[in-house]
Image: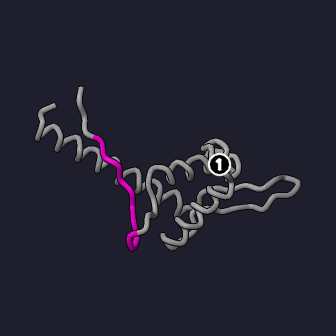
Amino acid sequence: MMNARSKIWIEKDGEPVFGDGRAAILEAIDGLGSIKKAAKKMNMSYRHAWGEIRLMEERIGFKLLETRVGGIRGGGAVLTGEGKEFLRRYYMFRDGINKLVDDRFEEFFGF
């Protein structure tokens, strides 16, 4: 069976802001409660993950994460309410685009 695939991302002033890779980082952080654990799961350095988060927040204009500094109980991170809402909307947007691509592919190629 043949299908069409597309890759979607969000840009601001020609600079990438958000896409599936960055969404995966946020999902991992939210699920694991830690940037360090999420970075390890994603096979990237903590520094790279943190850099991606800072870039996203700077370009989006709001905080995506709430962080706690380590100590006896350890540090941690979770998505802010705005971060969860942004992620939810991104997935709805992306899924809508994928549906549109599937429908157009069917229309033009009948597969």
Q: Quadrant of residue 98?
A: top left
Asked if residue 42 lies left or right of residue 100, the reply is right
Q: Position of residue 59 (x, y in %)?
A: 49, 71
In this rendering, the answer to whether 59 lies above or below 1 is below
Which residue is the extreme one toward the top? 1
For the rendered model, the colour scheme is one colour
Q: Residue at x 23, y 47 (%)?
A: 100
Which segment did they paint magenta? 5-14
Q: Quadrant of residue 80?
A: bottom right
The residue carrying mark 1 is: 39
Q: Nearer the viewer, residue 37 or 47?
A: 47
Q: Magenta segment, principal secondary structure? A: loop
Asked if residue 96 lies left or right of residue 38, the reply is left
In this rendering, the answer to whether 60 lies above or below 22 is below
Q: Position of residue 13 (x, y in %)?
A: 39, 74
> On the rendered image, what quadrant is the N terminus found in?
top left
Q: Position of residue 43 (x, y in %)?
A: 62, 43
Q: Position of residue 70 (x, y in %)?
A: 81, 58
Q: Nearer the viewer, residue 84 or 55?
A: 55
Q: Residue at x 64, y 60 (%)?
A: 50
Asked if residue 96 lies left or right of residue 89, the reply is left
Instruction: Say which element carries label 1.
Output: helix
> On the rendered image, what quadrant is the C terminus found in?
top left
Three-letter amino acid code at the position of disc 1:
Ala
Q: Residue at x 43, y 68 (%)?
A: 15
Which residue is the extreme one toward the right? 72
Q: How many marks?
A: 1
The 10 Å Cα crowd at callout 1, few under 14, some 14 to 19, many 20 or more, is: some
Asked if residue 97 lies left or right of residue 12, the reply is left
Magenta region includes residue 57: no
